[in-house]
């Protein structure tokens, strides 16, 4: 044990040494990387006061905040369902339940206009009783007996959690139940009386990005010290750390898989077999999705040749579970879905004996139900869904034919429909009441041409009577990373606080995302990333060329990886924007690997330890490319203190450097909430109102 700890620490030190740069010593703002340090927090307090003095004193702020708070705390929001043991569960926050309640009702009652909810867990009451600051980060429920769940409790919204077992019938934390102390951890129920847990079992058993790489089995009643090791990765592993997963289908089949990331997007998969794990011959770029009718469902993000056949990147495949167990090194997949040239796989969830699948067709949502056939094949039924909408699976019940589908669009309030997967029948059961007047608006899908000639689609939401005079206040947004697809979505805040006030909203489907499958994402990886930034600039230039807007009236907005996008556009094209809203961003790309979970994203961005990748990162890093004598727009930069994923350090240092160079800026840091805009609805509404006030000041005045 002592040797493994020393080995782990040595590996971590070597990685840190490889990443360290001489320029670190010349960075005058390294002290702001001490996330909770007294000096750093004093700086934050001072910056917040200056920004709030500007934005909250704007005469429009009060109205914007009132609208945002009303939307956030409205009790006519859709209660999105999770089916557990034949009951519908829902987590709910409002003005009366700041931290939130977990509640339940029957399926039949959920389908009514006014369900009768029973509170299962009241986090406000628990926090008060325990003198704690608990926020829910999710739950993992046992899927065989469906009587117990493991609840992730976060202190103020950070990713690290304390895990406690909850008894659904007794509506209380289980006495002497499973209890996992605070930390970044991944877990899965293996049986009703045993769980598989990845956590820092011994000091130092974490990857450089702070995630666990050791999985142990913990049986009911055992102390943590008695857990039996099932799998061990390595301290040098990339990505988000090893993750155990258990899948249970309606026929009683069950399988536990361990996902071991080697990099951000490459991972080995192992079959848990007794007290060890056996490697599966799956592509590194693949994901296990679900289990149905004794078939494991897998999506692949690279071409895969096996058993004399080649399966195309972006396909959804099935594997016979018995055959997989008998010969895990020689797998024989069957195609469920293979994408066309403008199609991409979205999601796959299993009911008792059907598979619900969503896809994108030119960034428009599609839905299907697949039924297994004898011999390993599949038949499909196309769901009757709107054309210009986003389709997502809310939940699917492995004990019945029940699934819930969400449908949303820019101007169409979100709905939830009950799907019978045997008949394909959809029945709307919940609808969000309109939150803004959309009657005067319209949506168009247009295309811009990027630097290499690639067509980049984008959506424009605008007033029907919009004049093409270049004077329309416009917010342009995108994400452009990690194969995340950005699709039409009903935003009450955008509608009420921006569209109703005459603004234009634009969503760009730039490369780096998953709108057109893995190849669309991979086109912008690492040193090819400039294409992503060129795509975004191309959309902006196209909007200006069409006289939809002008640089004077154009603002941009993005968060996390999208915050990096904003930073790059701020430094590379300051002449294109009047407003830049930079949310919970990465900005110092020469030190991102040493901040929070940054080392887990090397597969997306590259590493400073590799010379050509470091040279590229130095070229595009927003923090390192601020220059004197440039006419930058005044940005609004905001982050959260308890963001232990990206970390507040990037935003702080960027703002401090702007200040030192004499440039105007606005900086705001939410003190709670993790990687987001706040831990509760009131905090989120405040952040939204600050953003919209900023845009009004810059683009409307």
Image (cartoon, rainbow, N blue to C red):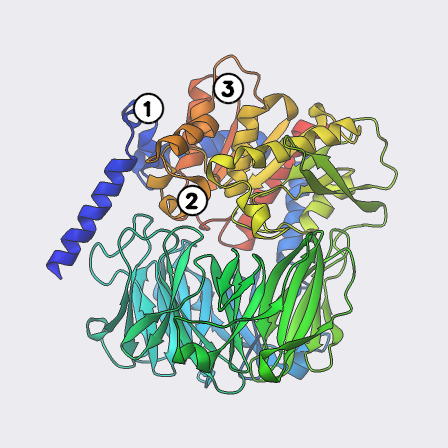
Judged from this view, the residue extending furthest toward the front is 308
Q: Is residue 306 above or below residue 672?
A: below
Judging depth in this view, the residue of 61 and 142 nearest the camera is 142
Q: CA distance from mark 3 to mark 2?
A: 25 Å
Compared to 153, does 598 lie above or below? above
Mark identifier at residue 104? none
Disc 2 designates what residue? 646
Residue annotated with mark 3: 663
Q: Position of residue 418 (x, y in %)?
A: 70, 75
User: At 35% from the left edge and 31% from the top edge, which residue is drawn?
Assistant: 611
Question: In the figure, residue 150 lies in which quadrant?
Answer: bottom left
Residue that badge 1 annotates: 28
From the viewer's perspective, tell me whether residue 492 is left or right of residue 326.
Answer: right
Q: Secondary structure at mark 3?
A: loop
Q: Residue at x 45, y 80 (%)?
A: 323
Residue 148 visible in image: no
Disc 2 residue crowd, few under 14, some 14–19, many 20+, Cα 10 Å: many
């Amino acid at each position: 044990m002592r040797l493994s700890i020393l080995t782990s620490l040595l590996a971590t030190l070597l990685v840190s040494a490889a990443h360290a740069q001489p320029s670190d010593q010349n960075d005058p703002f390294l002290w702001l990387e001490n996330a909770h340090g007294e000096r750093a927090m004093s700086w934050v307090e001072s910056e917040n006061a200056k920004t709030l003095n500007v934005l909250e004193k704007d005469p429009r702020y009060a109205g914007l905040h009132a609208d945002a708070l009303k939307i956030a705390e409205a009790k006519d929001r859709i209660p999105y369902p999770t089916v557990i043991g034949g009951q519908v569960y829902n987590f709910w926050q409002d003005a009366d339940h700041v931290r939130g309640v977990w509640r339940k009702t029957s399926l039949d009652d959920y389908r009514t206009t006014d369900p009768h909810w029973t509170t299962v867990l009241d986090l406000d009451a628990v926090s008060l009783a325990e003198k704690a600051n608990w926020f829910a980060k999710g739950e993992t429920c046992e899927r065989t007996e469906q009587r117990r769940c493991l609840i992730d409790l976060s202190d103020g919204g950070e990713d690290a959690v304390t895990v406690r077992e909850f008894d659904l019938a007794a509506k209380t934390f289980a006495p002497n139940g499973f209890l996992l102390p605070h930390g970044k951890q991944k877990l899965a129920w293996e049986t009703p009386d045993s769980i598989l847990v990845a956590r820092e079992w011994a000091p130092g058993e974490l990857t450089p990005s702070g995630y666990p790489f050791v999985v142990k089995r913990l049986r009911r009643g055992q102390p943590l010290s008695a857990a039996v090791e099932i799998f061990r990765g390595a301290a040098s592993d990339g990505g988000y750390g090893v993750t155990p997963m258990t899948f249970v289908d309606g026929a009683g089949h069950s399988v536990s898989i361990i996902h071991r990331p080697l990099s951000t997007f490459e991972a080995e998969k192992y079959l848990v077999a007794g007290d060890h794990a056996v490697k599966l011959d799956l592509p590194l770029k693949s994901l296990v999705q679900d289990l149905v009718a004794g078939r494991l469902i897998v999506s692949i993000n690279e071409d895969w040749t096996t058993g004399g056949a080649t399966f195309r990147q972006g396909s959804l495949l099935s594997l016979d579970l018995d055959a997989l167990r008998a010969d895990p090194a020689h797998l024989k997949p069957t195609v469920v879905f293979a994408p066309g040239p403008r199609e991409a796989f979205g999601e796959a969830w299993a009911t008792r004996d059907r598979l619900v699948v969503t896809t994108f067709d030119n960034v428009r949502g599609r839905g299907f139900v697949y039924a297994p056939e004898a011999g390993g094949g599949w038949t499909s039924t196309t769901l009757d869904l709107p054309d210009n909408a986003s389709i997502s699976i809310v939940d699917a019940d492995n004990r019945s034919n029940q699934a819930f589908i969400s449908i949303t669009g820019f101007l169409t309030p979100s709905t939830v429909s009950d799907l019978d997967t045997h008949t394909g029948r959809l029945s709307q059961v919940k609808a969000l009441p309109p939150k803004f007047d959309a009657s005067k608006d319209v949506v168009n899908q247009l295309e811009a041409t990027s630097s290499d000639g690639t067509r980049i689609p984008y959506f424009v939401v605008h007033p029907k009577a919009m004049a093409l005079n270049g004077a329309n206040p416009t917010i342009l947004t995108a994400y452009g990373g990690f194969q995340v697809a950005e699709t039409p979505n009903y935003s009450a805040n955008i509608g009420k606080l921006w569209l109703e006030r005459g603004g234009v909203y634009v969503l760009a489907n730039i490369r780096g995302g998953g709108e057109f499958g893995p190849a669309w994402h991979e086109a912008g990886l690492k040193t090819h990333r400039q294409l992503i930034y060129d795509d975004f600039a191309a959309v902006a230039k196209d909007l200006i060329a069409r006289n939809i807007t002008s640089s004077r009236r154009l603002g941009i907005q993005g968060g996390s990886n999208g915050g990096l996008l904003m930073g790059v556009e701020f430094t590379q094209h300051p002449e294109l924007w009047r407003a830049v809203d930079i949310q919970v961003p990465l900005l110092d790309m020469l030190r991102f690997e040493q901040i929070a979970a940054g080392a887990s994203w090397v597969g997306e961005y590259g590493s400073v330890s590799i010379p050509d990748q470091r040279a590229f990162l130095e070229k595009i890093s927003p923090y390192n490319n601020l220059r004197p004598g440039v006419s930058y727009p005044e940005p609004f930069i905001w982050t959260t203190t308890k963001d232990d994923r990206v970390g507040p350090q990037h935003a702080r240092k960027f703002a401090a450097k702007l200040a030192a160079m004499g440039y105007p800026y606005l900086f705001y840091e939410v003190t709670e909430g993790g990687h987001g805009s706040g831990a509760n609805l009131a905090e989120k509404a405040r952040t939204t109102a600050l953003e919209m006030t900023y845009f009004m000041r810059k683009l409307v005045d």
